[in-house]
Image (cartoon, rainbow, N blue to C red):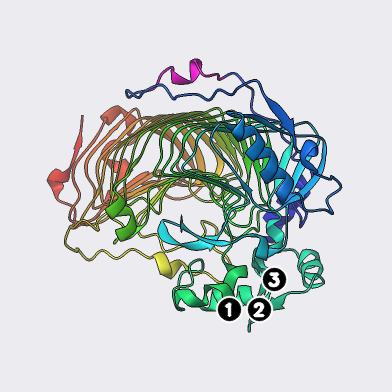
Amino acid sequence: MKTKLNIWFGILGLCLACSSPIIAQHADNSIDETSIYQGVEFDMPKVKTTSFPDLTYSIKEFGAIDGGLTKNTDSFAKTIQAVSEKGGGTVLVPRGIWLTGPIQFKSNIRLHLEAGALILFSKDFDDYPIIETSFEGLDTKRCMSPIYANGVENIAITGSGTIDGNGDAWRPVKKSKMTTAQWKSLLATGGILNEKGDMWFPSESSKKGFDSSTNFNVPDLIDEEELESVRDFLRPVLVSIVRSKRILLDGPTFQNSPAWNIHPLMSQDLIIRNLSVRNPWYSQNGDGLDLEYCKNVLIYNNVFDVGDDAICFKSGKDTDGRNRAMPTENVIVKNNIVYHGHGGFVIGSEMSGGVRNVHISQCTFMGTDVGLRFKSTRGRGGVVEDIFISDIDMINIPTDVINFNLFYGGNSPVLEADQSADKESRNEELVPVTEETPSFRNIFMKNITATGSGTAANFQGLPEMNLQNVKLENALLEAENGIIAVDTDGLELINVHVIPTKGAALTLMNSKNIHVSGFNYKSNSPKAISIFGNLSENISFREKDLRNGLAALSISNEVSPKAVSLK
């Protein structure tokens, strides 16, 4: 593990402030607003675009002072107000370092950052009032986001500058996520440690909030009246766009967020393109993009290098999500690059309102902990369906190229020092199917390539609600372990080439209606395919794919003799 960390720090050069330039440039801008709709498998309306009057005011016209020492909160607010009063237009941020508190959008405002412009948000937590919002799928209260838009229409953030959330001032840090030198430097800045000495907090208020929480992020053990006393713990997302329409994010770098980086919530008609989204890999909740309760969205030509999930779709958690009943739907994701992240493309674990009609293609993941990640748990409810994934290239995925985990309990894919795999161990006990049962179905993947990975694919449903109707076609998967399927109903593997360095190429347990055709494997095990579980049934292989015929199969005694057939 230490070797891997050293490699990443050497390659990416991420320092504590996340200030060094990213080594990668934007993905090749071969996708545009016309071609992005090509090849999409479902009907969706064209995303409505933004337009702005030909009016531009610079923040300098309203007293802004660059240099990073003078707060320009009032100058930003006055410029936005002046442009708004004229019917809308562009708020220009010239080259320079512009320190500020929160920037609140009004309708018909485009915030444009010139080359060399850096918006640096204040470390003064009192600049960010506590407001009602939603975080990690729960209705709660947090500090206002540095960039905040609520109930607006026709807004944009464009240009080639940088927006820095000063997240290192807010975030707690786990010692296990840092090198010795980084940890020493962090301690020299002040702050306090927990009792074990393995977690740093920026203040007593931050630590009190952590100690008052059962889920790390929402202080649910104290009354609402006490929230001011834990203000430092209530880390905001960098960009919060709530209940808004016609939004464009095009060009800037978004980095160093206190919590998630970009969080569109209950919004529609969004275009997110040509962005660099960055966080140190050790950043707690350092997600890149979290799309929640949104519809009609285009995400293309972006680069992500973050501390948690990179491109993540959500729709609320448990009762809050089910009651809102607003699925994330009609989303196209194309031509994105992901470097570090817990997952390259992710759905969940907060998916109680449902996720449907998603197309993702032409993406490259390099060194993400998981490639394609689907996660939930009993109690969530919600349906994830009609997900179409194609033309994904991956290298050096340390865990699963494809992962379905319906026993998710908060662990990172690569376990951290304070995490245990037992927290997410499977419980095969059947429980009743209710509105709290999550369901994943109708998920189609093709043209998937991955080399140097941990496990080729891990398809795991629930005993009471199997993973349903999943198809993997035209895949080349080189990994330490082969494909695993547990509690899966209707899995198709078509023209899949698996190259495991150990064990079976395919393992099936308590799975049914499995069709395997054109299966090519290179396995050191004499039994390339293993089948377990008394619930396994209707499993078919193409006979010519099995080099040794039935001798290639290892079938446990509890599997019915009629469960497996050759065609």
Q: Quadrant of residue 79?
A: top right
Q: Is residue 59 above or below residue 318?
A: above
Q: Which of disc 1 and disc 3 is earlier in sequence?
A: 3
Label pair 3/2, CB-CB below 8 angstroms: no
> Is the residue marked by circle 3 packed among few (<14), some (14-19), or many (20+) residues within 10 Å?
many
Under mark 3, the amino acid is: Pro
The quadrant of the rendering that contains the C terminus is top left
Q: Tell me the CA gap for discs 3 and 1.
A: 11 Å
Q: Tell me the CA gap for discs 3 and 2.
A: 7 Å
Residue at horizontal 51 percent and vertical 56 percent from the top = 413
The x, y position of residue 288, in whole percent, is 57, 46
Look at mark 2 in the image and give the residue it sits on: 204
Under mark 1, the amino acid is: Lys
Q: Is residue 230 above or below residue 450?
A: below
Give SS at disc 1.
Answer: helix
Q: Which residues are magenta?
A: 31-40
Q: For the view shown, which residue lies furthest in the front direction?
A: 85
- The secondary structure that most of the magenta stretch takes on is loop
